Amino acid sequence: MISIKNLTYGYYKNNKKYLLYNNFSADFNIGLTALTGASGSGKSTLISLIMGLAKPFEGEIIFNKNIKQVDFGYISQESELIPQLTAFENVYWKALLCFNENLAEKKSYDILEKCGIKDFKNKTDNLSGGEKQRVALARALVNDPFIIIGDEITAHLDKESTLVIINLLQELAVNKIIIIASHDSEVIKSCKNIIKI
Ligand code: ADP
Ligand code: MG
């Protein structure tokens, strides 16, 4: 479980303090959780805090797991693929950080298949927004992380591709903490838990 306790956080602009969170608490358990709220409400900021990229002004973010098990798979809003690599290679290089070559190749092909990427696995820089998003998802999933965090990951997908991704995430959520920041109603209605900020 990830437990956020009495979080206070914001930013300073022209010497003035703006709070995005004021004494905010929430728990993220195993399963699929939608993190929802209007644009600018602080969804991406909360993701940065959970991943340790920003520090709370006040309050705590607690993982009740051994640090060895706190591994993240993160999918950003902009996919951030390496444009010189093919779809397959973008996933495979990440797998190589975790597995030997044979296993890395097998894991990459398995996840490419699940994410519906096989047909364009050899494409490089001419990927559409939706294709990039699916490759970024496969890259995040290939080493089977315990915590998966996605930021607006279905923003560039049509309804059919969105459902493929949601079904996959639901399957994975049986034994993982999955947090998806989204205001896509398809995503929100398929999540077991909804946290609104
Ligand atoms: P969301 O992901 O829900 O759309 P964000 O977490 O990206 O929201 O941002 C929340 C709000 O805080 C936005 O309006 C953003 O412009 C503002 N913000 C966050 N950090 C800063 C900062 N360092 N300086 C100015 N504005 C910031
Ligand atoms: Mg955002």
Image (cartoon, rainbow, N blue to C red):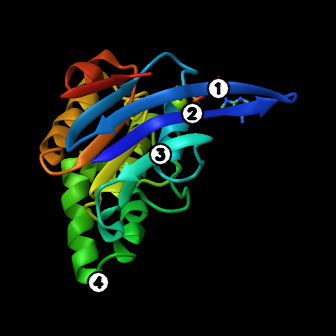
Marked residue nearer the N-terminal end (4 or 1): 1
Q: Which mark is residue 19?
A: 1
Question: Regarding mark 3 in the picture, which secondary structure is present there?
Answer: strand
Give the residue type at disc 3.
Answer: Glu
In this rendering, which labeled residue sits more in front, label 4 or label 1?
1
Residue 152 position, x and y percent, is: 43, 31
Q: Nearer the viewer, residue 191 or 10?
A: 10
Give the residue type at disc 2.
Answer: Thr
Q: Is residue 179 above or below residue 160?
A: below
Q: Measure how far apart labels 4 and 1 are at the Cα level.
A: 46 Å
Q: Measure how far apart labels 1 and 2 are at the Cα level.
A: 7 Å
Residue 101 position, x and y percent, is: 30, 82
Marked residue nearer the N-terminal end (4 or 2): 2
Residue 18 position, x and y percent, is: 70, 25
Q: With 173 as the anchor, is 140 left or right in this view? A: right
Residue at the spot of label 2: 8
Q: Nearer the viewer, residue 23 or 119?
A: 23
Corner quadrant of residue 151: top left
Marked residue nearer the N-terminal end (3 or 1): 1
Dot 2 alpha-carbon crowd within 10 angstroms: few under 14, some 14 to 19, many 20 or more: some
Q: Is residue 149 in view from this perspective?
A: yes
Residue shown at the point (33%, 49%) measured from the top left? 148
Residue shown at the point (21%, 50%) measured from the top left? 176
Q: Are marks 1 and 2 in contact (CB under 8 Å)?
A: yes
Residue at the spot of label 4: 100
Residue shown at the point (26%, 73%) measured from the top left? 105
Question: Regarding mark 2 in the picture, which secondary structure is present there?
Answer: strand
